Image (tube, helix red, strand yellow):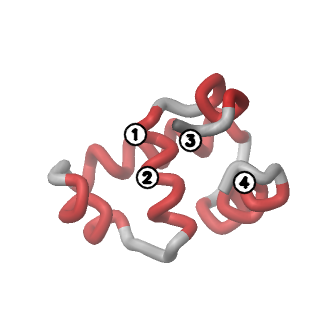
Amino acid sequence: MYPTEINEKFTDREFEILSLLADGASAKQIAHRLFVSVNTVTTHRKNILSKTTAPNTTALVAKCIRMGWI
């Protein structure tokens, strides 16, 4: 289980994708690992960006590390 703040901000799948993005995985690699389409990964990534108001994936990962979410 994830910290309460994470559960309130992201779905379990979003957090899973966020963690994989932070590990440097590409959308294609994440899709293969989670048995979903690349479009699904991209949609989740866009939703995460929207929730955090981060302008891009690099800023997203940096913000999540600063906040202690990952």
Residue drawn where x is 82% and y is 50% of the image: 67
In this rendering, the label closer to the viewer, 3 or 2? 2
> Which mark is nearer the camera, 4 or 3?
4
Residues tagged 2 and 1 counted as in contact (Cβ below 8 A):
yes
Please give the residue where the numbered disc 1 appears in the rendered image. Answer: 13
Q: Earlier in the sequence, mark 2 or mark 4?
A: 2
> Circles 4 and 3: CB distance less than 8 Å?
no
The answer for how far apart the CA atoms under marks 3 and 2 are is: 9 Å
User: Which residue is identified by label 2?
Assistant: 17
Residue 29: percent from the left, percent from the top? 28, 70
Number of labels in the image equals 4
**How far is mark 1 from mark 4, CA to CA?**
16 Å
| Residue 11 percent across, percent down from the top left | 48, 30
x and y percent of residue 62 in the render? 75, 64
Q: Are marks 3 and 2 in contact (CB under 8 Å)?
A: yes
Q: Disc 1 residue type?
A: Arg
Q: Nearer the viewer, residue 63 or 70?
A: 70
Distance (Cα) linking label 2 and label 4: 13 Å
Label 4 sits on residue: 64
Q: Is residue 26 left or right of residue 5?
A: left
User: What type is the residue that disc 2 sits on?
Assistant: Ile
Label 4: few (<14), some (14–19) or many (≥20) C-alpha neighbours in 10 Å: some
Percent x, y for residue 69?
Answer: 70, 49
